[in-house]
Amino acid sequence: MSLEALITFIIASTLLTLAPGPDNIFVLTQSALYGRRSGILITLGLCTGLIVHTSSVALGVAAIFMVSVTAFTLLKLVGAAYLLFLAWSAFRASVNRIDDKEQELPDATTLYRRGIIMNLSNPKVAIFFLAFLPQFADPSAGNMTGQLFLLGLIFIIIALVMFIAIACMAGIIADLLKTSERAQLLLNRMAGLIFIGLALRLATTSR
């Protein structure tokens, strides 16, 4: 891979991770609800999902979602159902949820797993990687699998940095909201609406 292609890939990846989408909106919302630590744990889960997508593309598995309408539809419906579950949980959340960290906040494993499920249940991520990564690989350089793994790793590192930055900024908002029960209630309702919107967007998306 030429230096020019690598720089172009890094710039494109940075812009893509900052563009509003299900993953970074998810990090933003959860961080605002539960604090920056929760957002970072979810980010680690999301990036773990990206490792799976990178491996799928490098090994050719993601092509299944390009040709199988059934596989694509099934996965996106599972993802939409999970987002609706999160919306339901947000609407039912009590107003003291943010303050009562020890008893109320999801544990680290739950938050990490939530990030993985969110990422893996979106088939468009696999298709995006399948369309995006090969554009920057050079067949004449040989070992396409290795090149795709490298590109995926670079993208994951960029996403990790950008999403953690989003989590930290949203965590500041959460700190400011801790003393206001009304603000907490409003934030939970807003999170629920965002999750519903993401679910509808995912359920109605096409390849």
Image (cartoon, helix red, strand yellow):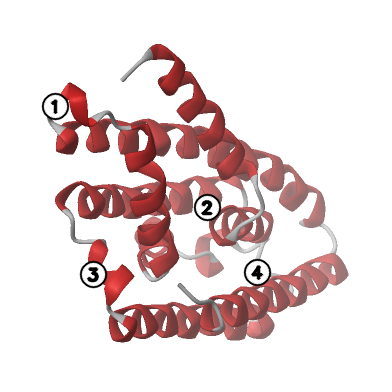
Residue 5 seen in the figure: yes
Labels 1 and 2: the sequence-earlier one:
2
**Quadrant the C terminus occupies:** bottom left
State the residue in front, 103 or 11: 11
Mark in the foreground, 4 or 2 = 2
* Distance CA(mark 4)–CA(mark 1): 53 Å
Image quadrant assignment for residue 143: top left
> Which label's residue is closer to the chain start, 2 or 3?
2
Mark 4, residue position: 97
Amino acid beneath label 3: Ile
Estimate the x, y position of residue 69 in percent, counting from the top left. 33, 83
> Which residue carries the number 3 mark?
64
Residue at 38% across, 57% down: 112
The amino acid type found where label 2 is placed reads: Ser
Q: First in sequence, mark 4 or 3: give its number.
A: 3
Precedes in sequence: disc 4 or disc 2: 2
Q: Secondary structure at mark 2?
A: helix
Question: Which residue matches tag 2?
Answer: 38
- The residue tagged 1 is 142
